[in-house]
Image (cartoon, coloured by chain):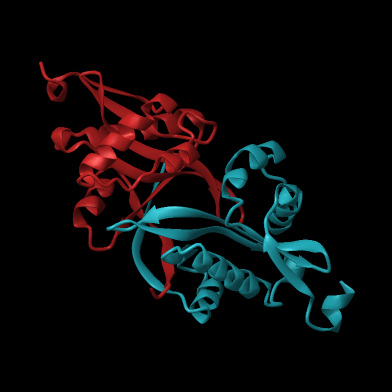
């Protein structure tokens, strides 16, 4: 990673495309440290294929090192059409370089252009680092409560 | 026996239910529905990731739950997300919403999908009570939002 060691990386944010699936999964595997059950085929034919319109990747020197998976959803009462960030991931070797901020800023601009009302994300209450990042980017704690049932 | 008094039947949603779903949505919205045909095409009823169910009363669709399989978080976790639960006003207060959620839970259990999620407005006490009554608990996730000025 010579360019990183010398200073600011050359980060290019662009819309996610089908051919990014391998890179996205590779980053997920790096973060988790293992291969997961999500397969290439599922990502193409399934969820990722359905969210490409709003999803982004960040390239550093031409290689995908970060991604945002997002979709357009209706939430709240009365329902409002918003951009929901489902997953934000940055290659562990490229974290703390401002890549996540650049991707979120680009995502906000894309949602503004598409005339969505807001952008939302769910963050673990113990993840103060991610909360700090989004607060710094102008996000505020919302009024939605997440309910979960484990089987 | 009228349609609103008939037997209740719950089943997976299919593409042929799209018109009935849009009709109920429009009925609730007073003629202006929130869900569009394009939205329903995106839902892909009966597709690989769709987990939606309909409730029929007397053979007519009287309610539905829109839910889908998704992957969220880092690392990815497979979860079922409840996107909407809608019951025809003429068939409300018959336990149909609960039956729809329980159908989804049963299906997820059979398919090995172990986590089901839904969101509710902080001030919507009825909806919060509804989910809590079905065994849902407040998660560790908190919601952050950035609203665009009009």
User: Residue at point 23% right, 37% down?
Assistant: B87
When the figure is inspected, residue A46 is found, relative to residue B146, above or below; the finding is above
Q: Residue furthest bottom?
A: A7
Nearer-the-camera pick, A10 or B93? A10
User: Residue at point 74% right, 57% down?
Assistant: A30
x and y percent of residue B65 in the render?
34, 37
Q: Residue furthest left?
A: B1
x and y percent of residue B141 in the render?
44, 61
x and y percent of residue B74 in the render?
60, 57
Q: Quadrant of the C terminus of chain B?
A: bottom left
User: Residue at point 28% right, 28% down?
Assistant: B55
Q: Please give left or right for residue B134 compared with residue A111 in the image.
A: left
Evaluate whether residue B138 shows in this view.
yes
Nearer-the-camera pick, A91 or A12? A12
Q: Residue furthest right?
A: A2
- Number of disc labels: 0
Q: Quadrant of residue A149?
A: top left
The chain coloured cyan is: A
The chain coloured red is: B
Q: Residue furthest front?
A: B31
When the figure is inspected, residue B63 is found, relative to residue A106, above or below; the finding is above
x and y percent of residue B128 in the render?
25, 53
Q: Quadrant of residue A105?
A: bottom right
User: Residue at point 26% right, 41% down?
Assistant: B26
Evaluate whether residue A37 shows in this view.
no
Q: Quadrant of the N terminus of chain B?
A: top left
């Amino acid at each position: 990673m010579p360019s990183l060691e010398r200073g600011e990386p050359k980060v290019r944010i662009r819309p996610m495309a089908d051919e990014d699936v391998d890179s996205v999964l590779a980053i997920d595997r790096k973060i988790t440290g293992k291969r997961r059950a999500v397969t290439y085929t599922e990502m193409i034919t399934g969820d990722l294929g359905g969210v490409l319109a709003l999803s982004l990747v960040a390239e550093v020197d031409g290689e995908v090192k970060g991604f945002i998976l997002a979709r357009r959803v209706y939430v709240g009462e009365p329902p409002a059409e918003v951009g929901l960030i489902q997953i934000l991931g940055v290659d562990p070797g490229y974290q703390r370089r401002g890549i996540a901020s650049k991707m979120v800023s680009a995502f906000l601009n894309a949602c503004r252009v598409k005339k969505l009302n807001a952008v939302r994300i769910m963050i673990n209450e113990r993840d103060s680092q991610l909360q700090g990042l989004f607060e710094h980017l102008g996000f505020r704690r919302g009024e939605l409560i997440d309910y979960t049932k484990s089987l | 026996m009228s349609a609103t008094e008939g037997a209740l039947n719950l089943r997976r949603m299919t593409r042929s239910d799209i018109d009935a779903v849009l009709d109920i949505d429009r009925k609730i919205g007073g003629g202006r529905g929130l869900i569009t045909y394009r939205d329903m095409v995106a839902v892909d009823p009966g597709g690989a990731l769709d987990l939606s169910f309909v409730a029929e009363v007397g053979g007519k669709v009287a309610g539905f739950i829109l839910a889908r399989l998704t992957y969220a978080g880092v690392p990815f976790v497979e979860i079922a997300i409840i996107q909407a639960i809608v019951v025809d006003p003429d068939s409300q207060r018959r336990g149909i919403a609960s039956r729809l959620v329980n159908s989804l839970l049963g299906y997820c259990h059979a398919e090995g999908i172990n986590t089901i999620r839904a969101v509710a407005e902080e001030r919507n006490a009825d909806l919060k009570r509804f989910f809590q009554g079905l065994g849902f608990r407040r998660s560790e996730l908190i919601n952050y939002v950035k609203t665009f000025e009009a």
